[in-house]
Image: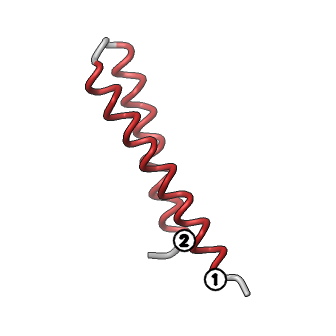
Amino acid sequence: MSGTKDKVKGMANEAMGNVKQGVGKATDNERLRAEGEMQERKGEAQQIKGKVKDALKKP
């Protein structure tokens, strides 16, 4: 997978995680809030992975 794909997937996961957290907070659903937080962290890690891949490709 290219660095760009990782970054895009990471942004999507981060956005969905933020939505889940918001819904979890609004509905007082601790499980959903925690799932959202984990998904956000996963997205952040994917973005970092993509940036590293791009950096390694440059001469």
Q: Evaluate if marks 2 and 1 touch, with contact meaning CB atoms under 8 Å apart.
A: yes
Helix, strand or loop at label 2? It is helix
**Count of residue discs:** 2
Look at 46% across and 50% down and name the residue there: 43
Q: Quadrant of residue 58?
A: bottom right
Q: On the rendered structure, is 19 left or right of 35? A: right
Q: For the view shown, which residue lies furthest in the right direction?
A: 59
Q: On the rendered structure, is 39 left or right of 30? A: right
Residue for badge 1: 57
Helix, strand or loop at label 1? It is helix
Q: Amino acid at mark 1?
A: Lys
| Image quadrant where one finds the C terminus | bottom right
Which circle marks residue 3 in the picture? 2
In front of the other: 37 or 8? 37
Look at 57% across and 74% down and name the residue there: 53
Q: Pinpoint residue 55: horizontal percent, then vertical percent.
A: 66, 74
In this view, 43 is above or below 32:
below
Look at 41% across and 37% down and name the residue there: 17
Calculate the distance from the C-alpha at mark 2 to the C-alpha at mark 1.
Answer: 9 Å
Q: On the rendered structure, is 59 left or right of 29? A: right
Colouring chosen for the image of the structure:
secondary structure
Q: Pinpoint residue 31: horizontal percent, then vertical percent.
A: 26, 25
Q: Amino acid at mark 2?
A: Gly
| Image quadrant where one finds the N terminus | bottom left
Look at 45% across and 33% down and name the residue there: 18
Q: Pinpoint residue 24: horizontal percent, then vertical percent.
A: 34, 21
